Image (cartoon, coloured by chain):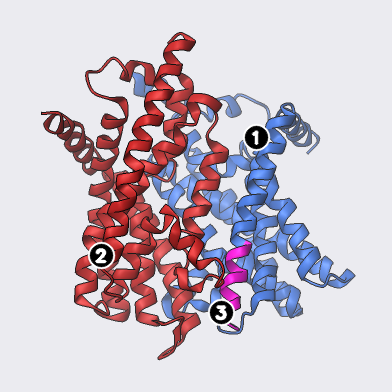
């Protein structure tokens, strides 16, 4: 029953995003620019016929397009936006609904992100196909699709957890900046984790950020490693109760303060 | 000119009024830039050169971009808000003043967070670029001319809102020029590279000034000077032409 009720904000948010053509074109344009730049850098670095830490130029292009799709599917300012809603007190009206605030918020963002992700995946795949040909492994590319959905889910959950610090600190700009950079480097958005210094690789692989860009990008770049999907699922099992508990604690605090 | 300086001084004073927030924002941007520098250091630990660009040259490019973009987005921060001002009818307050609208608009807001970029850019140049008097002079001149190109491009892209009444194209243009400027221009080939020397002049924002520091030449300096002058004139012309189409008080029109 709750799942059916949560489907309403999910579908409504997705439909609204699709209707806003200007926003869709803006998101798509930004994604294409980032992907073109990053993939050009890696292709130039690998050179024709060459490779970097086991990735060919083609594989690096598919890696860049996939990692960027996973990240660009979510509003870049999400943490700041959620934080603003909390610190301004707007979240109080959401607490009057018969559904948990965090559940509705995650449904809305999932609706938007999945629509965006679908568009970016089609555009990214087209771009890669034109530039370097088909994905290095068909199986890897197929596994990358559910992995992308899990990546977006894990990212949404952790971003809401980070944004929830606004219940205590009011300002989320600093946590937002730090979080972004962790995803960029330790999450494998800017570079495959194998490029990191040897000592840093196991650290990055042990953190949840790797589920958000590296996992789907690694699969799309031709490495058939289904265990990455299991790692993503395991992190979701850990992260979801944390965000639920954090919001519950935070909402109690808002009531105490007098909301 | 004195009036403009007074407005800029006021905008700076306003930005500095909250000291805690000012320093927090500077520190945040410095940390942000340090991560990007770390990215390049990691990248060049695996790769020797990329089409003639080694780690040191790329860090000089980053220093030029951080300083130039920081100055523009920090001191002339309304550069990026021109389309918003047009679409929401916020140019009215500038048009009622006895000043030239564009310069006044540009200097009337300071974004402290971007001044952190300037701190990083200058420090990075001092640390990695083996500064000598001539190299410092070339860095200053190249960075300022790159900043003129960057600001002019943002004004042109922002002024498109006069004609299309939307602000998304300008936002995309800002991201495009910043992203393309952040990487060595030679990683692009063919039409994409041509684009970066013409329509989206990202090459002249950082790569060409950085090359000027490394390989000084009169031709290189003349080229970037001519491009900066050309873009500045174009920015003035597009804004002035667009201003004739501006509907004053459009906020009330939209509300109705």
Nearer to us of marks 3 and 1 is 3
Q: What residue is rendered at 82% in x and 71% in y?
A: B135
Residue pointed to by mark 1: B109
Residue A95 is situated, as x and y percent measured from the top left of the image, at 32, 18
Which SS class for mark 3? helix
Residue B254 is situated, as x and y percent measured from the top left of the image, at 35, 24
Name the mark on residue A184.
none
Numbered disc 3: what chain?
B
Camera-nearest residue between B150 and A105? A105
Which SS class for mark 2? helix
Residue B123 is situated, as x and y percent measured from the top left of the image, at 77, 58
Q: Colour of chain B?
A: blue
Which chain shows up in red? A
Q: Residues within 10 Å of mark 3 (few under 14, many from 20)?
A: some
Bounds of the magenta segment: B37-48
Which tag, 3 or 1, sits closer to the chain's start?
Answer: 3
**Residue A79 appears in view:** yes
State the quadrant of the N terminus of chain A.
top left
Nearer to us of marks 2 and 1 is 2
Q: Residues within 10 Å of mark 1 (few under 14, many from 20)?
A: many
Q: Residues within 10 Å of mark 2 (few under 14, many from 20)?
A: many
Residue pointed to by mark 2: A144
């Amino acid at each position: 029953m709750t799942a059916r009720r949560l489907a309403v904000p999910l579908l409504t948010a997705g439909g609204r995003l699709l209707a806003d053509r200007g926003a869709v074109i803006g998101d798509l344009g930004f994604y294409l620019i980032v992907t073109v730049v990053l993939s050009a850098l890696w292709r130039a670095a690998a050179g024709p016929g060459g490779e970097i830490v086991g990735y060919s130029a083609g594989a690096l292009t598919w890696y860049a397009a996939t990692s960027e799709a996973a990240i660009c599917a979510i509003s870049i300012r999400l943490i700041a936006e959620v934080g603003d809603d909390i610190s301004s007190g707007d979240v109080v009206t959401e607490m009057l609904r018969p559904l948990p605030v965090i559940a509705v918020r995650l449904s809305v963002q999932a609706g938007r992100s999945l629509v965006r992700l679908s568009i970016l995946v089609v555009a990214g795949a087209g771009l890669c196909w034109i530039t370097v040909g088909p994905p290095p492994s068909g199986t890897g590319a197929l596994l990358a699709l559910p992995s992308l959905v899990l990546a977006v889910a894990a990212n949404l959950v952790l971003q809401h957890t980070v944004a929830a610090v606004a219940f205590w600190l009011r300002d989320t700009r600093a946590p937002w900046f730090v979080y972004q950079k962790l995803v960029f480097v330790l999450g494998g958005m800017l570079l495959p984790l194998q490029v990191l210094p040897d000592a840093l690789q196991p650290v990055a692989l042990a953190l949840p950020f790797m589920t958000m860009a590296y996992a789907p990008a690694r699969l799309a770049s031709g490495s058939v490693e289904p265990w990455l999907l299991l790692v993503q699922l395991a992190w979701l099992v850990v992260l979801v109760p944390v965000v639920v508990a954090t919001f519950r604690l935070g909402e109690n605090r808002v009531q105490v303060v007098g909301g | 000119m004195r009036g403009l300086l007074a407005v800029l001084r006021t905008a700076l004073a306003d930005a500095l009024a909250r000291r805690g927030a000012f320093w927090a924002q500077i520190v945040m941007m410095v940390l942000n830039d340090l991560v990007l520098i770390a990215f390049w250091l990691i990248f060049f630990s695996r790769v020797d050169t990329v089409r003639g660009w080694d780690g040191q040259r790329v860090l000089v490019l980053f220093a030029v971009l951080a300083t130039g973009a920081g100055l523009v987005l920090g001191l002339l921060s309304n550069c990026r808000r021109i389309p918003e001002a047009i679409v929401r009818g916020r140019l009215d307050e500038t048009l009622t003043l006895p000043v030239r609208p564009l310069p006044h608009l540009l200097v009337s807001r300071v974004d402290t967070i971007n001044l952190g970029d300037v701190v990083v850019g200058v420090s990075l140049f001092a640390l990695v670029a083996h500064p000598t008097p001539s190299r410092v002079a070339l860095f200053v001149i190249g960075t300022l001319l790159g900043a003129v190109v960057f600001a002019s491009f943002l004004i042109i892209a922002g002024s498109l809102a006069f004609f299309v009444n939307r602000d998304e194209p300008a936002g995309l243009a800002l991201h495009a020029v910043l992203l393309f400027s952040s990487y060595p221009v030679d990683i692009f080939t063919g039409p994409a590279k041509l684009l970066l020397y013409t329509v989206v002049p990202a090459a002249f924002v950082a790569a060409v000034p950085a090359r000027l520091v490394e390989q000084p030449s009169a031709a290189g300096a003349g080229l970037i000077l001519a491009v900066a002058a050309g873009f500045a004139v174009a920015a003035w012309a597009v804004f002035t032409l667009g201003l004739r189409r501006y509907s004053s008080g459009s906020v009330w029109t939209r509300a109705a």
